[in-house]
Image: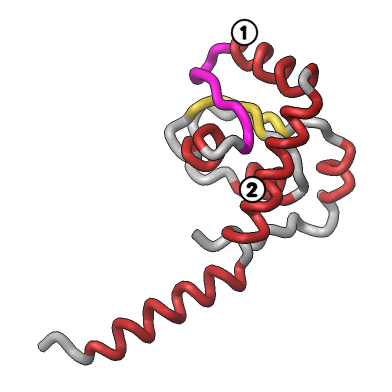
Amino acid sequence: MCVDARPPARLPPYYAAADVYLRTGIYEGENISSYYAMAMGLPVVGFETGLETELISTLGHGLLVPVGDAGELSDGIARVLCLRDRGREMGERGAAYARLHLDIRETVDWYSEAYHELASRGPRW
């Protein structure tokens, strides 16, 4: 994955003013704005669309609920907002993850190492 963990220059004030990031699409591939929110320390609450499950739910960067279930989404938002420490912890975990794993420099290093490893094996023909 190649994501620069810094949002475009005009967006940080909006993320900074938020208490939670809502991921409400019912069908999504990679949600880059979720990564930006994580990088800014926001917990992510949204629908489980099949991608980012491990990143958000399993690793504890936010809460995902069944697609289209507005009641569950509302409950998830309330849990994050009412249990401030839990929401803050989710946001901190997300920000730490973004710093370690979503930085473009790490991605470049990973690909560089992979290419060097493959090149050292020589041609396969």
Residue in the picture at 29% in, 82% down = 118
Q: Residue 88 lies in magenta, yes or no?
A: no
The residue at which mark 1 appears reads as 71
> Would residue 50 appear left or right of 3 to someone viewing this image?
left
Circle 2 is placed at which residue position? 35
Q: Residue at x 84, y 50 (%)?
A: 12
80 displayed left or right of 45: right
Q: Quadrant of residue 15?
A: top right
Residue neighbourhood size for the residue with mark 1, other residues' Cα within 10 Å, grouped as few (<14), some (14–19), many (≥20): few
Q: Residue at x 10, y 88 (%)?
A: 125
Question: In what element is the residue under mark 1?
Answer: helix
Which residue is nearer to you in this view: 8 or 50? 50
Rendered image quadrant of residue 17:
top right
Q: Is residue 84 above or below residue 42?
A: above
Q: Secondary structure at mark 2?
A: helix
Residue 87: x, y in percent? 74, 30
Q: Which residues are magenta?
A: 61-69
User: Relative to 65, is 111 on the left or the right?
Assistant: left
Q: Residues within 10 Å of mark 2 (few under 14, many from 20)?
A: many
What amino acid is found at the position of numbered circle 2 in the picture?
Tyr
The percent coordinates of residue 113 (x first, y second) are 43, 80
Q: Position of residue 95 (x, y in %)?
A: 70, 49
Q: Earlier in the sequence, mark 2 or mark 1?
A: 2
Query: Quick one: 63 or 11, which is closer to the camera?
Result: 63
Query: Looking at the image, which residue sits at the far left?
Result: 125
Q: Is residue 63 magenta?
A: yes
Identified at 64% across, 48% down, the residue is 35
Mark-to-mark CA distance, 2 and 1:
25 Å
Name the amino acid, label 1: Gly
Q: Nearer the viewer, residue 96 or 111?
A: 96
Q: In the figure, 9 relative to 22: above or below?
A: below
